[in-house]
Image (cartoon, rainbow, N blue to C red):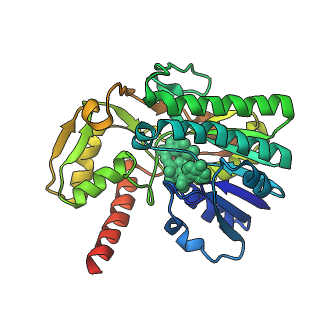
Amino acid sequence: MKSLVTGAAGFIGSHLTEALLAAGHEVVGLDDLSTGRAANLAEVAGHPSFRLVEGSILDRRLVSELAQGADRVFHLAAAVGSFVIRDRTLAALRTNIHGTENVVEAACQAGARLLLASTSEIYGKNDKAGLREDDDRVAGSPLRSRWSYAEAKAIDESLVDAYVREKGLRAVIARFFNTVGPRQTGRYGMVIPRFVRQALAGEPLTVFGTGEQVRCFCHVADVIPAVVALIDCEPAAGQAVNLGSSEQVSICELAHRVIALTGSDSGIKRQTYLAALGPGYEDMMRRVPDCSLAAGLVGFAATRSLDDILRSVIGEQAALQGAACAL
Ligand SMILES: NC(=O)c1ccc[n+]([C@@H]2O[C@H](COP(=O)([O-])OP(=O)(O)OC[C@H]3O[C@@H](n4cnc5c(N)ncnc54)[C@H](O)[C@@H]3O)[C@@H](O)[C@H]2O)c1
């Protein structure tokens, strides 16, 4: 079985690539290494069934060439992270809309099955506890760049839906809710690796806004088997499927837990959204998924607790810092 994984050098993409190779797939990864790193693929570098191509999903010819002969296309490449969206809004829109269009068209031309990585951001400001796939989006203004990522991903979903209905593409949409774990970087705004880095460095943990925002964090190791299963799951075809945990935590409580688990003497510092993310930033106060659809389709379950997740990220970052100190 041949798979094309876009965004293979990214956080989720690298874990997916490893899982596919372990299952005996042949994998071609496509990544422009903008937020991803070749080092994420160190464990599979040199694997006889793996090849990483450095290039962009905006390169239509390259995408089409790589999709030819693939049975499956996992489309994870995207401009991701609140700092990336804030600082390079136009480039992010182009990647997330035109790049995705190239991938969807190429998968369709190749007759491959497609999985599109989408996001809980789709639900916008809808803060219902237990968001279901058919719940309404509560959209912020498209003129606030903060929402442009959700806008682009929503267009991606509509594009996939149209290809499914009009062109017979076999595709499924996975909506990730705060997927976390080793290899995720805090450099582009992701909260857990950022807090862990700050705690290990003895710096104050910076909480944006009130800290009362509630999120559910799901370990990447729980998400990957569902991603692999969903692409082949016939009843899932044409659907969007939530993947996430239902263990709720406020960002303030998260900061306290990171401090406790690292044994750090760091304090907590609040920063306004204006100072952290620039003018016009809005947040959603609660984002909690209902994953009963994924549970029914592919037996998805978020088995790892938040403390399990934090221990795995702390273990990874402490080892990296130890290695850096030893140099
Ligand atoms: N991690 C999460 O919590 C989360 C939540 C919702 C959705 N997602 C989605 O999951 C996917 C993977 O996200 P991630 O968390 O692993 O982030 P990531 O930044 O680690 O992965 C994205 C990858 O795409 C690559 N990329 C960016 N632009 C590209 C381009 N033009 N051409 C080729 N490659 C390009 C990056 O270099 C990176 O390796 C994304 O589509 C993202 O929108 C992630």
Query: 63 or 175, which is in the foreground?
Result: 63
- The x and y percentages for residue 202 are 17, 58
Q: Is residue 301 left or right of residue 250?
A: right
Mark count? 0
Residue 41 vs 227, above or below: the answer is below
User: Taking 47 as reference, is 89 above or below it?
Assistant: above
Q: Quick one: 274 or 62, which is closer to the camera?
A: 62
The answer to whether any part of residue 307 appears in the image is: no
Query: Outermost residue toward the bottom?
Result: 327
Q: Which residue is drawn at the image coordinates 65% and 43% (left, top)? A: 99
Q: Eyeballing the image, is 13 above or below 105?
A: below
Location of residue 274 by image quarter: top left
| Residue 311 location (% of width, % of height) | 35, 59
Quadrant (top left/top right/bottom left/bottom right) for the N terminus: bottom right
Quadrant containing the C terminus is bottom left
Percent across and percent down for residue 261 are 25, 56
Taking 308 as reference, is 108 left or right?
right
Tell whether 306 sits left or right of 93.
left
- Residue ID at (63%, 36%): 97
Instruction: Name the image quarter holding residue 252.
Output: top left
Nearer to me, 99 or 320: 99
Q: At 47% from the left edge and 28% from the top edge, which residue is drawn?
A: 147
Q: Is residue 85 visible?
A: yes
Provide residue 69's location: percent of width, then percent of height.
84, 58
Position of 111 with respect to 239 (left or right) is: right
- Residue located at (49% from left, 44% from top): 80
